[in-house]
Image (tube, grey):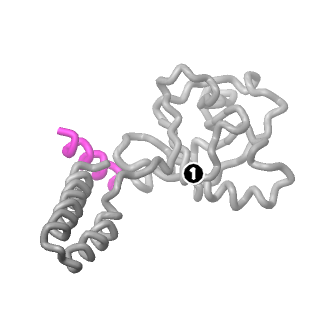
Amino acid sequence: MKKTSFKFFAIGLLGIVICLVLAYVLQSAYLLFAACVLPLLILPYMPDIRTNQEINPLSKNKSIQVYGITSGENQASYVVIEFKPGRIIWSKHALYFSADHVAMAPTSSLKSNAIALPIYKSDLIIKKGKHRWVGIKLKGMTERSSKFSFKLKQVNRLVVSIQDIKELFKEASPAHKRSIKKSKQLQA
């Protein structure tokens, strides 16, 4: 949560407590009404419940792995996110991973019995405030899955084109750099 959001949230809570105390002391229905309306005003500043998933590149948990599949000339052509079925919570908004922490793997290391889901460029987003983090909109996956013969619970691999990721970074480069600069200024 941002510091400014936390400040407004704290001020709102303090306002509610003050209104309740004054309503009790002064026996005022108007102050009681104000204490009831204040939660509606501070609602946008409430702490965010995690609506996204992140794949932590430094985690030792091997239930989700991100790696690049190399073609014949040792250039990665796809990013593969491999996971155990049920590990991805499809009701979340997005799944984020770091584009900088993608290990390379040969095509022969892929499991042949995996159910893969292709990720289109329209499903990709950039995470604000984090440098070179890519997100996959999971809502797009759930909408598209109704056309498939399998269920999302059975999927254990997502495949993203490296070219789509590069284009996404090119298109959003100036705006993304500004958001990174702002987030670093806020942290300092």
View extreme (right): residue: 149
- As for residue 177 lying within the magenta part, the answer is yes
Closer-to-camera residue (99/5):
5
The amino acid on which the numbered mark 1 sits, given as a three-letter code, is Lys
Residue at image coords 33%, 70%:
40
Residue at image coords 78%, 60%:
146
Residue at image coords 44%, 56%:
171
- As for residue 54 lying within the magenta part, the answer is no
Question: Where's residue 27, x and y in %?
Answer: 18, 74
- Whether residue 47 is visible to the viewer of this picture, yes or no, is yes
Q: Which residues are magenta?
A: 174-188
Question: Where's residue 101, x and y in %?
Answer: 49, 29
Q: Secondary structure at mark 1?
A: loop
The prevailing secondary structure element of the residues shown in magenta is helix
Closer-to-camera residue (41/171):
41
Q: Which residue is mark 1?
A: 92
Which of the 4 image quadrants contains residue 37?
bottom left
Few, some or many C-alpha atoms within 10 Å of disc 1 (few <14, some 14-19, many ≥20)?
Answer: some
View extreme (bottom): residue: 30
Which of the 4 image quadrants contains residue 67?
top right
